[in-house]
Image (spheres, grey):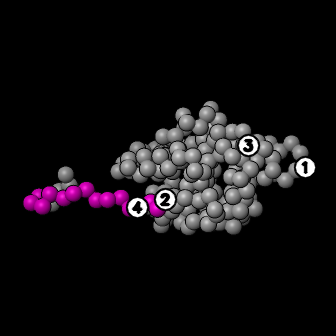
Amino acid sequence: MRQTLPIPATSLVGRDLEIAAAANSLRRENVRLLTLTGPPGIGKTRLALATAHALRKEFVRGVYFVDLAPVSDANLVVPTIAQAVGLRPLSARPLIQELEDHLARESVLLVLDNFEQVIAAAPAVAELLHAAQPVKILVTSRELLRIAAEHNFPVPPLSLPPVLADQGAPR
């Protein structure tokens, strides 16, 4: 199994329920695109990475992390995904078609991080999902992609630990 998931430097605390819920959503047959939404800094990327790590053994052909933070042109999303999965174009065919063919028989999970700045690439994601049936995609974004296969997973803020009323210290 191939994977390109970065290993976080610190452990993720306080998100066990969200990791389990997101992983369970992606295990459902009818969920092929799960978008983790929320404001900046809420932990979408860390939650996506933890969820992908939890699922990595279930995607026998690999789990691929696609960092879209440095990408501002929606036309570069497909080449960035192709590079992440190790696709080297061999023909003059459109890259999206080569990527679809490359992934058509693959049980893979693509993690597309920071999609909000390339939201215009959402139709390419829809096309990829349609053509490469076993592929599942986990997206982090401040906004929804607004495509038919999408399931929204709003990332809640971390809850504060209960406070002891008489001591004012966390339990």
Question: In the displayed structure, does residue 121 sit left or right of residue 139?
Answer: right
Which labelled disc corresponds to residue 42? Answer: none
- Mark 3 near mark 2, Cβ–Cβ under 8 Å? no
Earlier in the chain: of badge 1 and badge 2, it is 1
- Give the CA separation, mark 2 to mark 4: 9 Å
- Give the CA separation, mark 1 to mark 2: 38 Å
- Mark 1 near mark 2, Cβ–Cβ under 8 Å? no
Q: Which residues are magenta?
A: 153-167
Residue topped by disc 3 = 104
Q: Is residue 138 something that shows in the picture? A: no
Q: Position of residue 159 (x, y in %)?
A: 32, 59
Which labelled disc corresponds to residue 156? Answer: 4
- Give the CA separation, mark 1 to mark 3: 19 Å
Going by the numbered disc 3, the residue's amino acid type is Ala
Q: Position of residue 72 (x, y in %)?
A: 68, 64
Going by the numbered disc 2, the residue's amino acid type is Phe
Name the front one of labels 1 and 2: 2
Q: Main secondary structure of the magenta part?
A: loop
Identify which residue is drawn at 38% across, 62% down: 157
Secondary element type, mark 2: strand
Residue topped by disc 1 = 92
Q: Which residue occupies the foreground of this view, 118 or 127? A: 127
Secondary element type, mark 1: loop
State the quadrant of the N terminus: top right
Q: Is residue 126 above or below residue 120?
A: above
Which labelled disc corresponds to residue 153? Answer: 2
Identify which residue is drawn at 36% across, 58% down: 158
Secondary element type, mark 3: loop
Determine which quarter of the picture holds residue 56: top right
